Amino acid sequence: MPVYRDEAVVLRTHKLGEADRIVTLLTRQHGKVRAVAKGVRRTASKFGARLEPFMVADVQLYEGRSLDIITQAESLGSYGALITADYPSYTAASVMVETADKLTESEGSLQQYLLLVGALRSLSRREHGAGLTLDSYLLRALSMAGWAPSFQDCARCGTVGDHSAMVVQLGGIVCDNCAPPGSPRLDGATIALLSALLTGDWDHAASTAERTQAQATGVVAAYTQFHLERGLRSLEHVSK
């Protein structure tokens, strides 16, 4: 059976038998992989802690009939313990890995892998607020998946201008002519924050008021849930 090696981030794990685990990995080169880590739940396991959610590892696997088998794991990013020690970071990371799991359902993506690893690293280092990091990750991940929102020109007709109607079903901000009756309106500060989160303008994002950040979070959550048909179970647990 062929042996291969790759970098991977652990998305989730499930118990298997008395000592094994099924580990779902998003790899750099092989997309999403489900593999068995034998004996990983024993205290004497050499790589148990390296295969926990949010960890990034260099793994060696060999192909099995239904599930691959992990034979080696060396830590590349020990983010798990740092993230789980902070509840807002933990809930944000939980949404991130669930999103990555859903967005790579049919095929992997190097861009999605790199984005997730970067977001988890940022969370572990507390570089930005957990909520801002999550919102930025969700907007970028959806954009990479083909659902890039528009926060400037009308998402429906392309009309340039200062628009305020937000319609997630139409792809973002729309002009008055395209906005359905009763469409929610966003103020300029919230629209500017959403644009900053999408482009990575952290200086602007960090300087915004909490009320503006909260409104932007609501927009991002609605946009994400609409495009991920089954929704995100972990999103309801995000620390506000």
Image (spheres, helix red, strand yellow):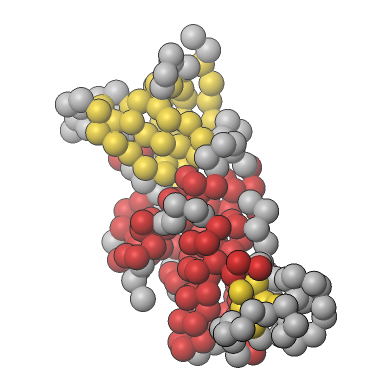
**Residue 131 versus residue 101 in the image, above or below:** below
Residue that lies at the very extreme toward the top in this rendered image: 1
Q: Residue at x 36, y 56 (%)?
A: 233
Give the camera-side residue of 88 and 55: 88
Q: Residue at x 35, y 25 (%)?
A: 36
Left or right of 73 in this view: 42: left
Left or right of 135 in this view: 150: right
How far from the left and from the top, in percent, is residue 138?
Answer: 54, 62
Q: Residue at x 43, y 69 (%)?
A: 130
Q: How many marks?
A: 0
Instruction: Tell me which corner region of the image, top left, top right, bottom left or bottom right, holds residue 10.
Output: top left
How far from the left and from the top, in percent, is residue 45?
Answer: 25, 29
How far from the left and from the top, in percent, is residue 102?
Answer: 49, 46
Residue that lies at the very extreme toward the front in this rendered image: 181
The quadrant in which the C terminus is found is bottom left
Residue 189 visible (yes or no): no
Instruction: Tell me which corner region of the image, top left, top right, bottom left or bottom right, holds residue 141.
Output: bottom right
How far from the left and from the top, in percent, is residue 166?
Answer: 61, 78
Residue 64 visible (yes or no): yes
**Residue 208 versus residue 111 in the image, above or below:** below
Give the camera-side residue of 50 and 227: 227
Give the camera-side residue of 212 and 219: 219
Left or right of 78 in this view: 20: left
Q: Residue at x 55, y 58 (%)?
A: 227
Instruction: Tell me which corner region of the image, top left, top right, bottom left or bottom right, holds residue 203.
Output: bottom right
